[in-house]
Structures are given as structure tokens and as C-alpha cells.
Image (tube, rainbow, N blue to C red):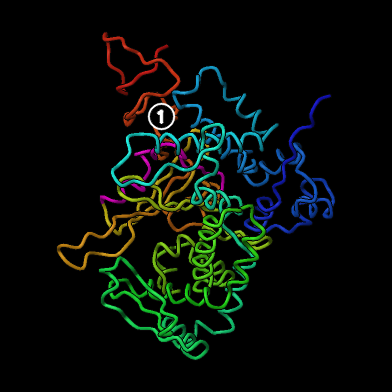
Amino acid sequence: MKKPATKTFTGSRIRHQRNRTGMTQSALAARLGISASYLNQIEHDVRPLPLPLLNALCDIFCVGADYFSDTEETRGIQTLREIMADPVFDMQAVRLDSIQAAMRVAPDLCAQFIRLYRAYLLQQEHTATPLVGSSPPPRAGASGTPDRVEPYEAVSDWVQAQRNYFDEVDRTAEHQFEQMRLDDGSPAEQLARYLLDHHGIRTEVDLSLNHKGLMWRMDRRQRTLFLSRIVPSESSTFWMAQALGQIEHQDVFARTIRRSRLRESEARGLARVYLTNYFAGALLLPYERFRITAHEVRHDLERLQRHFGVSFEQACHRLSTMQRPGSEGIPFYFLKTDIAGNILKSFSANRFTQSRFGGPCPLWNIFRAFSTPLQVQVQMSQTTDGAVYLNIARTVGRSSISYLDRPRLTAVVLGCSIADAEHLVYSAGLDLKDPRMIIPIGPGCRACTRENCHHRALPMVGHRVDINNEGRGIAPYRTAQ
């Protein structure tokens, strides 16, 4: 018996495009030749999107079919392609259409395969030449592989599965903002006063925290929140908001975590830390106020900074969380990296997928940002799946406080589909339809299929290298024909 095709549910993306163009549900239904009630069911994911309507929607909104594709399936396919690039597999034996079919037919099995590969990598790292004093390898099961996924990876997967939006936490923070009237004066002063008046907790600067490697510390016995003197004012405000979340809303965080599939105590603890940070950002940047203001200023990050008194990174991160059902903002991806290319944060509300098992592409503008500190870098890029993005990158973090100080060098990048680029001030002066403006980026050299790239650092795994000495190609490692 033939297995039915995978159903596509894409209500939020249809609703976003309809709102973006100012079209009512009835007007769109009329153009599609269906009833308004049927469209309403599609927009609320009660009914799947039929293929004929998909094609019609692409024509109406001038977007490609990939815009309505399942983002989780796309990410899974990209991850499997990277895994199959490992020399332990024969990449030539597995075609791309086979990977796509596997994700459509057996997504749960593919997810377990990805989990197994992560465990394999973890075991490889621990069984390599150990460092003196290093911790023992994780406990292995009967198969010889670790019997758990790293807690950090598990939490990252959970956050991504939620598209970096947690409704109850978000609405709790928004309600508290209005209750406290946090916009009536300095948020830092308002938070300090609230902590003192409602919880008897004083806020003080501790000059010794930096030497202890701490930015802030809560002393419940002394009922004092100690803050480092070296952090910018917006960071101090964020820490106070975080402390407030820890004090008043542990029950909200606990309910959210119970709904997850996180079972290990360490993963649940990391999830609680993440939700505390999420609450702090949502308190300082309440959803509807921030979404409306972002739209009014065309997502100008510097203007959003000044308006809400937050950092560039906090404004970027908040934009990546605007996925409230029925009130969605532009779907952004957000990523933070250090100068060595280590991924520190990564969330995506669109189909963009970062490399999971290799280094990021050097053509990405997040790396160019390090050569122009505190200046915004704008780039149009195209990933190997054909999707085009508008990327905004800039360095973030504090400056040095002394000659001997060594602050971490980091940068963030915020990206949206080219279909949404016109709603960003950063598209001003760009010819969004000129293919010469688009920079091709990949998932990392090992898995990248772009053969004639000047910046290739490693051969394309799974393909024979051309060892002909009679000529030299654009890339140092050419694939044999």
C-alpha cells in the first residue's frame, strides 16, 4: 500500500504574508477560489496546505515554494548531508533525493540517527589522547556509545523546536512590564526599586566580582544582588530582570520545562537558565510594544537600542523570538560566534540552518564584522539549498578596561528571507534582484557542494580529489570528474 504524502502545515507563514501585504482573510480566500472558513482552517493548521493552493500563494505573494516548505525537514536534511560527509560513510552511495525521502517518510528515525552520530562524535573526542586532569569519558551503554546526548545540545534542540518562542513566559513578562510600568522612567531604577520594595533585595556594585569571573551574584542571606562594575548599564538592567524572574516566576519556568522532552536534571537546569534569560529579554522588550516599534522603524537595530535602552545583541535576539501565533513578526535567524568561529548561540525562525558538525563558511559577513568593530555589515547571501537571505552582522561585547584586560571578541548576525528584506532599513540602496549582489555561502567546506569556491579550505568529503598536475583550478582541492 502506498504511503500518503507528507502533509504540509504552514498557517503562520500564510498569515504573515497576508498581514504583510495588508490583505484580509476574505480577500485572499476570494483570490484562491476557496471559502474564508477553509482558509481560516489552513491558517490555524487545522487543514494541510494542498499543492494547487501552494502554487497560487507563491504567485500572489511573489515568493518561492521554499518559503512554505517545512523548516524542520529542511534543517534535518542539511544536518544529514553534513553527517554523510564524514569519511566514516560513503557519501557517493547516498543521493540527496534519498536523504530527502528519508526525512519525509521516517523523520523520527532520522532524528535518532542524528542523535547517534552526536554520541559517536562525543565518544571520539573523549577517547582521543586525554588531557592531564581531564574528566573521564561519559558512561557508555552496551553498544559502546554514550547513553545520553550532551545537555547543551538537548536544550538547543528543544529551543529550536519551539522556534525560540515560549508563549507563557513571554506573556508573563509582558504582563509584568505593564504592571510595573517599566517604561515610566529608567528601567534600571524601576527594577532596583521593585526588588527592594517587593522583596527587600538591595542592588550593589561589587568590585571583586570581575576577579572571580562573575558578572553578578545573588546573596540571599544578605538579601543583596551584587553587580560587576565593568558591565555596561544595559547588561546590569538585564541581570536585574533575570533576578526578578528567578525570584517570582519559577513556577512558570517549571511548567514550560515539564512540557518539554528534557529528562536529565542537567538539561532541565540549563533549560531553566535559558528561560530565565528569555524572561529578562521579554520583560525589557515586551512583545507587542517591541513588535510594533520594530515595524515602525523598519527594524533599525540602533534605533531599537536607544528606544528601549538595551544592547545591540539584546535587540537582535529579541527579533528572533517574534513568533507569537496570530501576531508574528518577521522570521529571523540569530547567531553569535567568537573570532575563532565557535558558535555561542544559534536560533532560527526561518529555514536557515547553521553547520552542526563543521566550521561556518568564511564568506559569511559575521566574520567580516571582526575587521570593522561596532560597524554594521550588510550582506545578501544564498545557501546551498537556494534560499537567499539578507544578513546584518556586527561585533558586540564590552571594550577593554585596561591594557591587560582580554575581553572576548564576539559578533552576532541576524538574517531574514529576501522576501522580507524590503521591511528592513538595511535593504536601502540594495538591488535585491541583482544576482551579482548575492554571496554564496555554505555549511562548511567539508559538506559544501560548491566546487569552484576560492575560499575552500578542505576537500569535499565523499568525492575523489583531482590529482592532475597539468593544471590548477580555482580551488586548491578540485573534485575529480
- In the depicted view, which residue is nearer to us: 169 or 203? 203
| Above or below, comparing residue 224 to residue 311 in the picture | below
Residue 235, quarter of picture:
bottom left
| Above or below, comparing residue 163 to residue 226 in the picture | above
* 407 on left or right of 288: left
* 445 on left or right of 8: left
Q: Residue shown at 59%/38% (left/top)? A: 74
- In the depicted view, which residue is nearer to us: 435 or 319? 319
Estimate the x, y position of residue 350 in percent, counting from the top left: 56, 48
Q: Residue shown at 44%/77% (left/top)? A: 240
Estimate the x, y position of residue 49 in percent, counting from the top left: 75, 43
Residue 189 lies in the magenta-colored region: no
Estimate the x, y position of residue 409 in percent, counting from the top left: 29, 55
| Above or below, comparing residue 11 to residue 88 in the picture | below
Q: Secondary structure at mark 1?
A: loop
* 69 on left or right of 418: right
Q: Is residue 117 something that shows in the picture?
A: yes
Residue 72, quarter of picture:
top right
Dot 1 amino acid type: Arg
- In the depicted view, which residue is nearer to us: 48 or 382? 48
Estimate the x, y position of residue 294 in percent, counting from the top left: 51, 65
Q: Main SS of the magenta segment?
A: loop
Quadrant in which the N terminus is drawn: top right
- Span shown in magenta: 350-371
Quadrant in which the C terminus is drawn: top left
Mark 1 surroundings within 10 Å by alpha-carbon count, few (fewer than 14), some (14 through 19), many (20 or more):
many
Residue ID for mark 1: 446
Residue 370 lies in the magenta-colored region: yes
- In the depicted view, which residue is nearer to us: 17 or 278? 278
Q: How many marks?
A: 1
Q: Residue furthest left?
A: 403
